[in-house]
Image: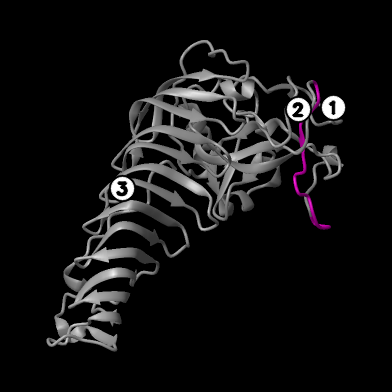
Amino acid sequence: STQSTWGSYVMDDDENENGDDDIVISSTKVDSQGRPHGRASVVYGSGARYEGGFDHGARRGRGTLFLPEGGYLAGVWRDDELQGYGELVAPDGSWLSSESWSGGELNGVGEERTSDGRLLFRGIYVAGVRHGPGELFLYDGGKFEGEWKHGAMHCDRGKYSFPDGRSTLCGRWRNDRLERGVFVGILGRPAPGPVSYDHSRDECAYADQLLQFEKMRNKTVADPYESQYVAVCPSTVPHAGEGLFAIVDIPANTIAAYYNGCILSHKTVDGRSWRFNNNSITLDDTQVIDVPRPFDSCKLYCASLAHKSNHAPPLRANCKYDVAYHPRWGDIKCIRTLRLVSAGTELLADYGYTGHNARVPTWAG
């Protein structure tokens, strides 16, 4: 998502709503009124704990406030509030850092990083929320550039760079969604016609799948990113029907095609006949992506094509299924090349058939 999960953190009366009796002080020095002075550890009635410097009861100097819900706020304090440089670390280990903390809030330039240190966002914050120019770096290598308003990308001249580093979408974004844009591909030329996306996609019961596809707009409009890399042709795999082929040389570790469809629960997929699962793929622990019949035909649906990639054993597979972000559908699956795939070569992925009870189609071998 392009949205921020950070909010502001404003100090409230020593984090204590129930009076001084709920403050526990561990300090070698207190002033004449019993307030911490110097290095101290203070536990507030809210459950928050501060360790650091005090000046007659007010936080001052370097210190860390450990939050009741987990995570902490660390930096330099003055007049009981974080001022200047500070880091807000979430319970999952991700963090937001900036030199623009003022009055306990972040107002200015900041950076967000994931728990493993990967840069996620760099830009302007107001009251701890993305609001202004910024750059969002996605887990799959994609990147957003534009203006954020109240935590969401919202601008007339936004830009999304695909993970291949050569393809872009530029246009008008509203509340994290591209309303209208221009696609520029690997040849450096704009694609004919504007790009306009229908973003609706909800989890549905199996009985509603066909209705969901019927309502989908632009379902027979080819994705401009995919169109520069792949095409559907008769498969070289015996009895497999159609397959997906490279139409240009595709470098290693490149997203070649996306896998979109209906979103179903695992319970729905596991509870129906295997013959309905020819184009089903796990998205995460709770969701499955499915392209139901008759929409497995390109005449009825060709907005994404990764479901056309056939199976090959690990040693023959030249691509793999991976999680990826698409500016129309959000987090979905894709096929990513494992090595250079030459033009005219069929893209084959290991479906992960394992175990003696695996239900393997006859054409998969």
* Residue sitting nearer the eye, 289 or 315: 315
114 lies above or below 149? below
Crowding at dot 3, Cα within 10 Å, few <14 / some 14-19 / many 20+, comes out as many
At horizontal 68% and vertical 37% (from top left) the residue drawn is 336
**Sequence order check: which comes first, mark 2 or mark 3?**
3
Amino acid identity at mark 2:
Gly
206 lies above or below 101? above
At horizontal 48% and vertical 30% (from top left) the residue drawn is 160
**Sequence order check: which comes first, mark 2 or mark 1?**
1
Tag 1 secondary structure: loop
> What residue sits right under mark 1 in the picture?
236
- The reply to whether the C-beta atoms of the residues labelled 2 and 1 are less than 8 Å apart is yes
* Residue sitting nearer the eye, 161 or 56: 56
* Residue sitting nearer the eye, 65 or 216: 65
Query: Does the magenta portion include 350?
Result: yes
> What residue sits right under mark 3 in the picture?
129
Q: Give the range drawn in magenta.
A: 344-357
- Locate the N terminus by quadrant: top left
- Locate the C terminus by quadrant: top right
What whole-number distance in Å separates the C-alpha atoms at marks 2 and 1? 8 Å
The disc placed on residue 154 is none
> What residue sits right under mark 2 in the picture?
243
Q: Is residue 49 visible?
A: no
What whole-number distance in Å separates the C-alpha atoms at marks 1 and 3? 52 Å
Q: Residue 189, percent across and down? A: 56, 12
